[in-house]
Image (cartoon, rainbow, N blue to C red):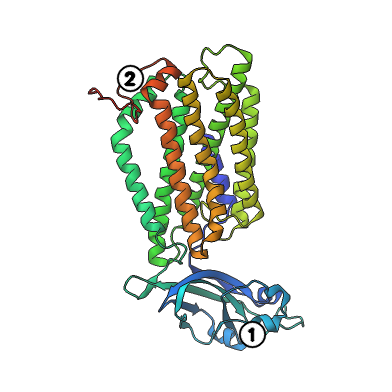
Amino acid sequence: MYPFLVMLTAYLHCVPLAKGKTVSGVFRSDAARENNGQYITKFLFHGENALLVYRLEDVSTAMQKSAKLLLYQGLQGSDNLSCLEHISGAQLSVALSTEEYNLTIPPQPFPRAWHVKYVDRYTCQETDISGVLKDIRFQITMFNPDAAGNPLDHFSAEEAGLHSFYFLLILAYFVAACVYIQPLWQALHKGGPMHTVLKVLSAALLLQAGSATFNYIHLARYSSDGIGAPLIGSLAEFCDMVSQIQMLYMLLSLCMGWTLSRSRKAQGKPLQWDTSPTSTALALSAVITQGALLVWEQFEDAEHNSYHAHRSMAGLLLIALRIILALLLASILYQIITSERSTLKRDFYLSFAKGCFLWFLCHPVLVLSSVVLNEHQREKVITIGVILCQAISVVILYRLFLSRSLYWEVSSLSSVTLPLTMSRGPRNRY
């Protein structure tokens, strides 16, 4: 528990908190000069009556600077334009001349990403402006039309529906817990050679459920104010990261332990988790690498989510790492399966391989497949797809280690009360 708390504290101190679509901050003329306009945020508007609302604290300074908000539908290729050409290319422009203003976005047949920038009269000037400018505090809130067509929905188009998905996911976790908590607790209480595997699987599942719960709380508040609970959103990402690391360590340790145990001693207990310094070192190396890439990705991506389309270098390296690990596991399991004479044990390893590959490859496959989707569909498809695939992977591994026939092969224990049994015969009462 102590290492978990240390990791959590370090993560929350090092990783920026998640941002909502009610954006607060300061307009700075020097930042606008450095970047041909100060970049504020991005939002995917859709339909009719979409709305952008800004509020200022110092209107007189904004008017003195001739301050404006510019909205672009795309920023690709803008690096080759001069400052004046870039500013004149904005699709929408609104002068910051009042304390509060509502800007209605033109109707759109399908969701489009709009980028918001701040500029003023000093943005394209080359003379020194230091010491004469005052920053302007602001708040910008963006709305999409709700089901009734009123501009009250804080969710960007790529986030729409995630709130309901997390609610259904939590409900599914709750129902599964009510059905299986008692027999699962009995299985854990009995111990056995695979006791550690069951504990790791249970911990990973609890972290997944915790991540879903925290995301739901964050999005519930987000739906009302466009900000949500950034600390809780970051906590959801942290729980998911720890779950990923736990599963990676378990799967690699099992495969390497099985391989090394077969080469150095008889196959008395070939399916037992038999760790060694070599298998532990390899698993820890992969865990440290994946953890570093996950944290690096959070620093690079301004829009924090548990799963990304991976446009950053850290994200691409993370995808490559998962593919390499899947190939490594495939090689190890192929050697084990081809040398195994027992049909029952081969079936065990094949089912284990399915769970492993589903866990590691679902994210890379979904990311690669998402390139054919529209921009507003990618994050949702990746997020929902990865969560469901990894939940199915955990269920496959639970069924594998808790089924009566295979569990007896692993631990020499047999029980009719084990949950998620693969046997279709009638079950006795507890």
Residue at figure coordinates x 57%, y 48% from the top left = 364
**What mark, if any, has residue 242 been given in the picture?**
none
- Residue 233 position in % (x across, y down): 47, 54
Q: Work out whether residue 52 or residue 372 is closer to the camera in this orientation and state it.
A: 372
- Distance between mark 1 and mark 2 Cα atoms: 74 Å
The image shows residue 5, relative to residue 104, as above or below, that is above
Name the front one of labels 1 and 2.
Answer: 2
- Residue 230 position in % (x across, y down): 48, 57
Residue at figure coordinates x 41%, y 21% from the top left = 407
- Indicate the secondary structure of the residue bearing disc 2: loop
Identify residue type, mark 2: Ser
Residue marked by disc 1: 88
- Indicate the secondary structure of the residue bearing disc 1: helix
Residue at figure coordinates x 33%, y 45% from the top left = 172
Q: Is residue 429 left or right of residue 182?
A: left
Residue marked by disc 2: 415
Q: Quadrant of residue 146?
A: bottom left
Please indicate, yes or no, whether residue 29 appears anywhere in the rendered image.
yes
Identify residue type, mark 1: Ser
Going from N to C along the chain, the mark reached first, 1 or 2, is: 1
Please indicate, yes or no, whether residue 1 appears anywhere in the rendered image.
no
- Residue 33 position in % (x across, y down): 69, 77
Q: Quadrant of residue 398?
A: top left
Callout 1: 10 Å neighbours few (<14), some, many (20+)? few
Residue at figure coordinates x 50%, y 40% from the top left = 358
